[in-house]
Amino acid sequence: MKKNKQLKKTKWWLDPVFRFVLLSGITLLVLLLVTSLRGVESVLIQVTSLILSKILSLLQIPYESHFLDSQFAFQILDGTKLKYMIVPDCTGIYPFSILTSFIIGYPTTWKHKGTGLLFAVLLTGTVNFLRLTLLIQIGRISLSSFHLWHTLIWQSSFLLLIVGFYFGWTAWIAKNQ
């Protein structure tokens, strides 16, 4: 009988699952609000376009870019008709924000969270630029395949990346505690 009363007295806000969902949700909401600010979006687009320009130059892919209303328009100049815009979705900020919110919400030390955030930045950034580069190559080869790769394959890949990284990170924490 005493155990039943003690269980009922447990404060619901101390439940680890509730705290994870609440903290992750608040973190994700704040990150999405901040990154949706026009100035922040513009900086993300400019940085992404600058790095992508360097990658295209390294790969010797001729291109032309124009800054249009806070977006970068790229046109590949190798005879293909590939034109694309760098918009906020192209920056990789949304997968990073989701992963960051999961990391912040997880009940562990700030040292582990910091390590997770560092690797999350490196991983999502690297995968995003790999994604953009491969999409350009696919678009150069087959414009009809571009849409499938852009919307279905890479979106699914980012989702799997987030889940895989999160579970790998939590397993690493369990091993190191």
Image: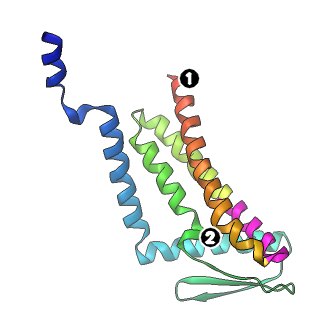
Relative to residue 156, is residue 23 drawn left or right? left
Instruction: Give the residue type that dot 1 points to.
Output: Lys
Question: Which residue is at a point 36% across and 40% down the rendered structure image?
Answer: 20
Q: Dot 2: few (<14), some (14–19), or many (≥20) neighbours within 10 Å?
A: many
Answer above or below: position of 120 versus 148. Answer: above
Foreground residue, 124 or 152? 152
Q: For the residue labelled by badge 1, is the local secondary structure a helix, a strand or a loop? A: helix
Question: Which residue: 18% across, 25% down?
Answer: 10
Query: Disc 2 on helix, strand or loop?
Result: helix
Q: Are marks 2 and 1 in contact (CB under 8 Å)?
A: no
Q: Quadrant of residue 158?
A: bottom right
Which is the main secondary structure of the residues drawn in magenta?
helix
Dot label at residue 48: 2
Provide the residue span drawn in magenta: 128-142
131 falls in the magenta region: yes
Residue 151's place in the image compared with 72, above or below, is: above
In percent of the image, x 40 and y 60: which residue is there? 31
Reply yes or no: does residue 91 show up in magenta. no
| Residue 134 badge | none
Name the kind of residue labelled 2 in the image. Answer: Thr
Residue 138 falls left or right of residue 93: right
Q: Is residue 87 above or below residue 120?
A: below
> Is residue 127 or residue 115 the one in the foreground?
127
Q: Position of residue 95 (x, y in %)?
A: 54, 57
75 with respect to 29 (left or right): right
Q: Which residue is mark 1?
A: 175
Q: Residues within 10 Å of mark 1 (few under 14, many from 20)?
A: few
- Could you tell me how many numbered marks the image carries? 2
Camera-nearest residue between 80 and 121? 80
- Percent of width and height locating residue 62: 83, 81
Q: CA distance from mark 2 to mark 1?
A: 35 Å
Earlier sequence position, callout 2 versus callout 1: 2
